[in-house]
Amino acid sequence: MKTPHGYCDLRVERVNDDIINAYIEHGYALIAVNTTLNCSLLGIGNSNKKKRKFADCNDENDEEKDWVPTPKLINHNDSKLTILKRLTIQITNIGQLQKILSSQNFKFYNILAVEPLNDKVFQDIVTSPSVDIITCSMKTSITPKDYTIAVEKNIYFEISYCPMLFNSNARQDTFTLAHLLYIKGKSKNLIITSGAANKLDIRNPHDVMNLGILLGLSRKLSMKSITQGCYSIILKSYGRKLGKSAIHLKPLKNNF
């Protein structure tokens, strides 16, 4: 496991040689390739009797079926860029999160992001130690208390800039979300990602930091949104994979 360093983009929707080279040319050191899973469409953790009956009629066994897809295939040997795997799940109840966490394929991912599709599940996920990133919209009902709990649990909020590059409505929604996160939690624990699907979507780190300032972040928070904030997420994910452990430090005798 490499210690995270340099500029980071923790949401890249597609990866190929052109995209990898673009990130290296822009000076990024680490990216995370995203896979999105809408759990509500799959009926995971859903108590709807009709869906359960449909599954039974089709001989579907939830215990045997792995709902989480395998991560996107990445062919990359350049030591200049570290590539991690991120899973973003869209959920309507906390049972869907528990189902994902028990998946065998989930173990292949480094970062877990959750997009709550209702206010009740948002209140549930801010207390989960397994969640790294919360992806929300301006319609998400966020209270200062929930925001504070998320920060205490080392959970980060995310703003992606690619949608706002090509759509005026998305641009307005992004500014509204940024303002909401400032009002509710002073923009603490906020990262900026691209959501890039091709190399033309990618912006260099200095442009991203300037965008952060336009979104209401201070210069310090804007820098942290693509550096230290991302490191914290990655180190948390490393710790989750390693499990509980203890170390003992013993000072060496100075023989000089």
Image (cartoon, grey):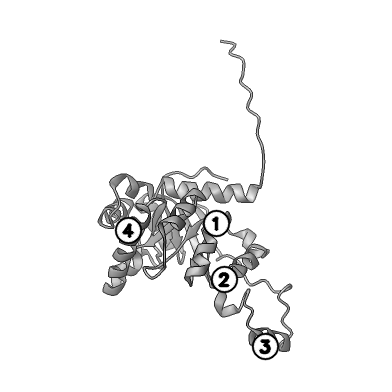
Identify the mark nearer the N-term, 3 or 2: 3
Q: Nearer the viewer, residue 230 or 135?
A: 135
Distance between mark 3 and mark 4 Cα atoms: 46 Å
Identify the mark nearer the N-term, 1 or 4: 1
Residue at which label 1 appears? 127
Q: Nearer the viewer, residue 205 or 158?
A: 158
Distance between mark 3 and mark 1 Cα atoms: 33 Å
| Residue 80 visible from this viewpoint | no
Q: Residue at x 29, y 71 (%)?
A: 166
Q: Is residue 56 left or right of residue 231?
A: right
Q: Which mark's residue is nearer the viewer, 3 or 1? A: 1
Q: Please tell me whether mark 2 sits on a helix, a strand or a loop.
A: loop
Q: Position of residue 48 (x, y in %)?
A: 63, 83
Crowding at dot 4, Cα within 10 Å, few <14 / some 14-19 / many 20+, comes out as some
Q: Which quarter of the figure has residue 44?
A: bottom right
Residue at which label 2 appears? 93
Name the residue type under label 1: Thr
